[in-house]
Image (cartoon, grey):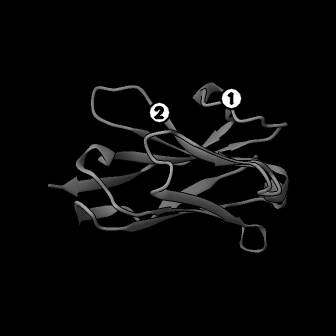
Amino acid sequence: QVQLVESGGGLVQAGGSLRLSCVASGRAFRTYAMGWFRQAPGKERMFVAALNWSGSMIYYADSVRGRFTISRDSAKNTVSLQMNSLKPEDTAVYYCAARSTYYSGSADPGQFNYWGQGTQVTVSS
């Protein structure tokens, strides 16, 4: 069992930056693939970025590639999402997710076993 707790959301102007963090409980964290998803009001939960257990394979949605960076620190059981050049369309609740089995880059939220409670990111124009 893994528990995920996100932090770092907030209100920022367009063009600004935010850094989201997700702390995971459990010693198995270093074996899990980790991802970030987001959900805007009235819309489906969408893939943002993910990486495999070692961090050697990293995947991004086209909409954030070049602006967002996902990373993990297994010593601290933490996965982070650095978000730069934020746009109003990035406004959403951002969720951290974990997958306990082999991960090959799927953007399907159903491929992830564990979820955090979400953190709100609002980008004003």
On the image, which quarter does residue 101 sit in? top right
Q: Earlier in the sequence, mark 1 or mark 2?
A: 2
Location of residue 70 in the rendering, given as x and y in whole percent from the top left corner: 59, 58
Q: Position of residue 119 (x, y in %)?
A: 40, 54
Question: Distance from label 1 to label 2 (Cα)?
Answer: 12 Å
Can residue 27 be seen here? yes
State the residue position of label 1. Answer: 111
Q: Is residue 35 visible?
A: no
Discs 1/2, front: 2
Q: Residue at x 63, y 25 (%)?
A: 110
Residue 102 is left or right of residue 123, and the answer is: right
Out of 1 and 37, give the one closest to the viewer. Answer: 37
Determine whether, in the image, residue 122 is placed left or right of residue 22. left
- Name the residue nearer the viewer: 112 or 59: 59
Q: Which numbered marker is on residue 46? A: 2
Q: How many marks?
A: 2
Residue sitting farthest toward the left: 125
Q: Position of residue 89 (x, y in %)?
A: 28, 43
Quadrant for the C terminus, please: bottom left
Which of the numbered marks, if any, corresponds to residue 90? none
Q: In the image, what residue occupies the spot 83% across and 61% down?
A: 27
Tag 2: residue type?
Answer: Met
Counting from the top left corner in percent of width and height, residue 43 is at: 33, 26
Q: Amino acid at mark 1?
A: Gln
Secondary structure under badge 2? strand
Secondary element at image label 1: helix
Q: Is residue 89 above or below residue 69?
A: above
